[in-house]
Amino acid sequence: MCGIVGYVGPREAAPVLVEGLGRLEYRGYDSAGVAVLNGGGVETRKLAGRIALLRGLLVEAPVHGSCGIGHTRWATHGAPTERNAHPHTDCDGTLALVHNGIIENADVLRTRLERAGHRFTTETDTETLAHLIEDSTGETLEERVTAALGHVEGTYGIAVVSETDPGKIVVARRGSPVLLGVGDGEFLVASDASAVLAHTRSVVYLNDGDVAVVTRAGYRVLDSHAQEQDRAVDDIEWDLDAIALGGYPHFMLKEICEQAETVRSTLRGRLLADEGTARLNGLNLTPAQCSRIRRIVIVACGTSWHAGLVGRHVLEELVEIPVSVEYASEYRYRRELRIPGTLTIAISQSGETADTLEALRAAKTVGSTVIGLVNVVGSTIAREADGGIYLHAGPEIGVASTKAFTAQVVALLLLGLWLGRQRGVSVDEGRAMVTELLRLPDLVARTLQVESQIRALAQRYAEARNALYLGRGVNFPVALEGALKLKEISYIHAEGYPAAEMKHGPIALIDENMPVVCLAPKDSVYAKVVSNMQEVKARGGRIIAITSEGNGDLGRLVDHQIAVPASSPLLAPVLTVIPLQLLAYHIAVLRGCDVDRPRNLAKSVTVE
Ligand code: G6P
């Protein structure tokens, strides 16, 4: 979703800003722009379209100066046009501002400001902020920004420059992440660490309510009471290679193919073979707290929600506690009951998804302990949770999530093992599971060998207009995830369904043009899934079966059979999802789609 970059230092700002914006492209955006203090006033360049076009515009019409801000916009209020692109300015063009988030009372503020004589030129909610700051009094830019934000309802991460305070960027956050990059004699501002990584690995994460003042000489962080605060300087653990393509044509393919390594990384140092359990120090849960858990609620969105559905099976099986899995966006507005002994698990790759964050906060207000399963270190969900498990999958750049899903499932398996061992799973059972988990990275590597088969399948089905994905038990969420992957990046309509439930609706759609992907690894519902495949076959549907090695040949029942290595049933989703990720990828490539930046989607949805 929208991205922010800022720079102040000895260098020309524009190239640094554009480079940083390029690193944020993966988040999804439709327009981009920069504003630079040129020694006299503020100069802005912006347009609808890609960063490459902005780069071209800056060659034709350069802007010079060593302090500036930049933005990639993902339209919420107003169409993705040049006019609505950020930065936005006040009436005189004295100040410029970039904003992530949503100003919820923008209409009220706009009416008031227009009555006071302010002239608006865009349809955005953000422009109200520029006029509000113009309207505010205060000696310094930070005082005026703080005063203006006092009128705002909603969420924001902002960066502001003004010709009245040259060489200064004022930054503020509430509900939308912003961090400072601490360089050598220069400072950066960004909504995401990838944008500063080419210049520094030292970052300061701002908290909600913080206002920061950044100049070439240093930075100051003020909290919501204007008190100066010390904020820790953190080190980014990964480097630029992690966000480079490394020879792959797309990030999505790179991230699919990395999964043997990322699964290994999620497991690293966390398995205790002798004790048959996991070491999860970050959970911050005492044995006494564990014994009090009566129910688990998982909150998440998108692919992370699918991982949560797998988690329900894992946790109910191993921990024998009822688990419910909620869309975070629904949960946060439902009346949540204060039930003692509730453990809430927020699952999020980015750790910034607005609905998941608010669901976490809602759970806390009813007294639940909250843990986060998060990939991005230092993200808001990671910081607000009582404890958690970092996925350690490395940066995920492709908008369609792949390696984060498998890492989330692995983290849930670790959690299930750890909690289960405290509540009835025996040492021997625990040891058996540790052995299985240790084998998992190799099984993932072997699963990835199906790619050539999948490429051939993609040729066959690239022109399909619809697709159905069926699974049962722990593989039903995999069906949902397979369908989501296909629709996200190839724009083919696809649905995931519990295999037997198909008879209550989707069966009406089945004919010889309908590919039906059936998840049928060897487990307790295998025979049932085979019956469901018979039902599809009887209606002429084309069956692609994902089975496990040793299942035997399904023969003429299916049109295609792809076998993944056999594993214990709870681990199977980590393997069965891989052919589906590859299928979506290769179909999307054949259809000429922008795989890493699918239309209308954002990597991290920081608005509700
Ligand atoms: C967006 C992304 C999805 C992701 C979802 C939840 O929709 O495009 O890939 O699954 O957000 O994101 P999170 O960062 O919370 O896992």
Image: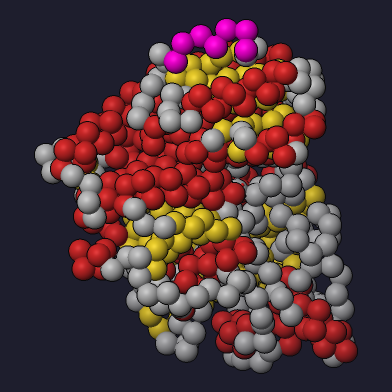
Residue 390 lies, in percent from the top left, at: 36, 51
In this rendering, the answer to whether 167 lies above or below 482 is below
Of the pair 589 and 29, the residue shown nearer to us? 589
Label count reads 0
Image colouring: secondary structure
431 left or right, relative to 443: left
Of the pair 15 and 373, the residue shown nearer to us? 373
In this rendering, the answer to whether 204 lies above or below 411 is below
Q: Is residue 247 among what the camera can see?
A: no
Residue 364 lies, in percent from the top left, at: 44, 74
Residue drawn at x 60%, y 38% as measured from the top left: 498
Residue drawn at x 67%, y 82% as measured from the top left: 152
Residue 260 lies, in percent from the top left, at: 38, 28
- The quadrant of the image that shows the N terminus is bottom right
In this rendering, the answer to whether 240 lies above or below 89 is above
Asked whether 554 falls inside the magenta stretch, the response is: yes
Of the pair 481 and 324, the residue shown nearer to us? 324
Which image quarter: residue 426?
top left
Residue drawn at x 35%, y 70% as measured from the top left: 341
Residue drawn at x 63%, y 45% as measured from the top left: 25
Write down the region rendered in magenta. 551-557
Residue 464 lies, in percent from the top left, at: 77, 23
